Image (cartoon, rainbow, N blue to C red):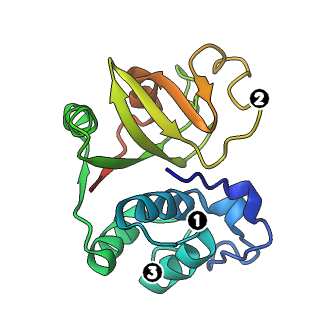
């Protein structure tokens, strides 16, 4: 799967009423995740700068970040991709183990009892695979050393741009937030 790092898109505006100077680098994890999934499933070119326009047109960029509750159904309709939101981690595990597609997960970041592994705040990541309870993750904020800080160190191993972690790490990062299942 092609990897898009949102940090490569500081020059691409992604504005909203609450982020008048917003750009993909600081608000575009959702569009980067959507781009990766759409390109993989549909075999088309749909980079983050194009997805950002689509997100704005669909109304998913009217607050902070990207509202996946709006963007996911818009993707489903526009690209004929079945999308299902779920809070059931057992369903996510089965979906990935059975290689039915890809998942956009929404991390909540640091809490009193947990240091966010994939982000210290709200952030979207793509779950690409699951084998023996190890999940493959594409993190659009990945940069060298991202997982070497206290609280994250030792929870993730890297292979190129793919981060691998025990599914419980993702589950703890995403407590109470929906997962969006994108079917192949």
Q: Is residue 37 above or below residue 138?
A: below
Q: CA distance from mark 3 to mark 2?
A: 34 Å
Marks 1/2: CA–CA distance: 26 Å
Helix, strand or loop at mark 2: loop
Viewer-side residue, 67 vs 98:
98
Q: Residue furthest top?
A: 154
For label 1, the crowd category at 10 Å Cα-Cα, with few meaning under 14, some 14 to 19 and many 20 or more, is: some
Query: Of label 3 and label 1, which has the lower sequence position?
Result: 3
Look at the numbered disc 3 and give the secondary structure of its residue.
loop
Q: Position of residue 126 (x, y in %)?
A: 46, 46
- Residue position marked by numbered label 3 in the rendering: 59
Residue at 58 percent across and 70 percent down: it is 47
| Residue at image point 55% right, 53% down | 2
Mark-to-mark CA distance, 3 and 1: 12 Å
> Which residue is the site of mark 1?
64
> Is residue 45 or residue 70 the one in the foreground?
45
Mark 3 in CB contact with mark 2 (< 8 angstroms): no
User: Crowding near pointer 2: few (<14 within 10 Å), some, many (20+)?
Assistant: few
In the image, 62 versus 134, the foreground residue is 134
Which residue has dot 2 on it? 145
Secondary structure of residue under mark 1? loop
Instruction: Give the side of residue 154 with respect to residue 44, left or right.
Output: right
């Amino acid at each position: 799967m092609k990897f898009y790092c949102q940090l490569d898109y500081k020059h691409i505006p992604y504005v909203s009423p609450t982020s008048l100077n917003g750009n993909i680098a600081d608000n575009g994890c959702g569009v980067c995740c959507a781009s990766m999934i759409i390109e993989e499933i549909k075999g088309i070119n749909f980079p983050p700068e194009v997805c950002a326009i689509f997100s704005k047109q669909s109304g998913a960029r009217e607050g902070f970040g990207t509202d996946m509750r709006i963007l996911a159904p818009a993707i489903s309709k526009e690209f004929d991709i079945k999308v299902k939101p779920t809070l059931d981690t057992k369903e996510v595990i089965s979906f990935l183990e059975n290689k039915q597609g890809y998942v956009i997960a929404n991390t909540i970041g640091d809490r009193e009892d947990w240091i966010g592994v994939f982000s210290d705040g709200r952030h979207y990541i793509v779950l690409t695979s699951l084998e023996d309870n190890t999940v493959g993750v594409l993190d659009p904020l990945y940069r060298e050393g991202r997982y070497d800080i206290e609280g994250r160190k030792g929870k993730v191993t890297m292979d190129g741009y793919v981060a691998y972690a025990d599914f419980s790490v993702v589950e703890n990062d995403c407590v109470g937030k929906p997962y969006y299942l994108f079917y192949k």
